Image (cartoon, rainbow, N blue to C red):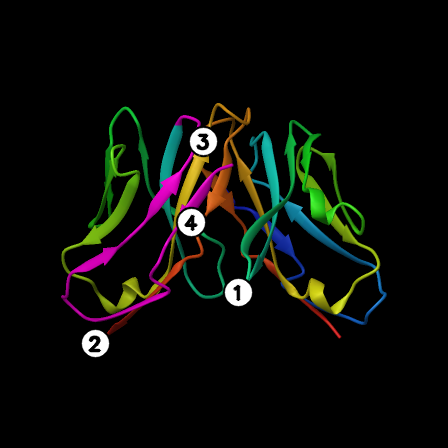
């Protein structure tokens, strides 16, 4: 099986731009997660979907971050408008079901100038 | 809420030395504990998993034992190799209290192994 795919691998944006990050989970997985990874904060959960339904929309990230799951094999994370503090690695992960391990993609490194 | 503490930010060893990474956790739920490893340019990947039922896990020469009394979940390896250089995350999975397998990650420990 193919692993979790994320595109693009690198993104550079100007402050105020809108960017969309994409994720394809492992085929057949029901749960999908978006995380942000920084050196200071480590890994922080942004959003969680179960069978395409949004189950958790991480509090502090609500106002400019929006994750969507258009079908069971594709998800997007939109950041609008971007700010320099959004510079980080954005990771997507999927899991077969409740209680199973999460499989992570390679991440998208976002730099906001 | 749940929390995971990894006090060691970085561990530097030579090949064939013994590895010990300290991890303690706090939860009011029913934990499953994981160690994830992250190599440069990749996402974290599962190294091993331990539940309250089996309390010990091992994989690729790494071992971890869950101790409910001290709420610890330390990672050990008898003899490290240069290829083990990576970031190691202690992770708490709360499978019941929050209704799904929400993971709480420690800050990570960078392991550097020199030949």
Q: Nearer the viewer, mark 1 or mark 2?
A: 1
Q: Which residue is mark 2?
A: B115
Distance of label 2 from label 3 (alpha carbons):
36 Å
Badge 4 vs badge 1, beta-carbon distance below 8 Å: no
Q: Does label 2 lie on the same chain as label 4?
A: yes
Distance of label 3 from label 1 (alpha carbons):
27 Å
Q: Residues within 10 Å of mark 1 (few under 14, many from 20)?
A: few
Q: Which residue is mark 3?
A: A100
Which residue is nearer to you in this view: A101 or A28? A101
- The image quadrant of residue A31 is top right
Which x, y percent locates residue B98?
55, 27
Q: Residue at x 56, y 44 (%)?
A: A93
Q: Residue at x 81, y 72 (%)?
A: A14
Magenta span covers which residues?
B1-30
Which x, y percent locates residue A30?
59, 29
Q: Residue at x 21, y 52 (%)?
A: B76
Q: Residues within 10 Å of mark 2 (few under 14, many from 20)?
A: few
Q: Which residue is mark 1?
A: A39
- The image quadrant of residue A50 is top right
Closer to the chain start, of discs 3 and 1, is: 1
Q: Which residue is mark 4?
A: B45
Mark 3, secondary structure of its residue? loop
Mark 2, secondary structure of its residue? loop
Q: Nearer the viewer, mark 3 or mark 1?
A: 1
Judge whether residue A40 is colored magenta.
no
Above/below status of A40 relative to A100: below
Which x, y percent locates residue A44?
58, 50
């Amino acid at each position: 099986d193919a692993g979790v795919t994320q595109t693009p691998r690198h993104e550079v944006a100007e402050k105020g731009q809108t960017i969309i990050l994409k994720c394809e989970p492992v085929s057949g997985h029901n749960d999908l997660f978006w995380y942000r990874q920084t050196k200071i904060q480590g890994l922080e959960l942004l959003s969680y979907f179960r069978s395409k339904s949004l189950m958790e929309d991480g509090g502090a990230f609500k106002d400019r971050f929006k994750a969507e799951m258009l079908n069971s094999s594709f998800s997007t994370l939109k950041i609008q408008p971007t700010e320099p503090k959004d510079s980080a690695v954005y990771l997507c992960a999927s899991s077969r079901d409740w209680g199973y391990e999460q499989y992570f993609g390679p991440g998208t490194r976002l730099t906001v100038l | 809420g749940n929390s995971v503490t990894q006090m060691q930010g970085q561990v530097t060893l030579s090949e064939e030395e013994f590895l010990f990474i300290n991890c303690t956790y706090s939860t009011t739920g029913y934990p499953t504990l994981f160690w994830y490893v992250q190599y440069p340019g990749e996402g974290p990947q599962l190294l091993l998993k331990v539940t309250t039922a089996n309390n010990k896990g091992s994989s690729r020469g790494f071992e971890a034992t869950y101790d409910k009394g001290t709420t610890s979940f330390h990672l050990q390896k008898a003899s490290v190799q240069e290829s083990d250089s990576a970031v190691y995350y202690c992770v708490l999975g709360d499978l019941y209290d929050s209704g799904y397998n929400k993971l709480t990650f420690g800050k990570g420990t960078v392991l550097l192994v020199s030949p």
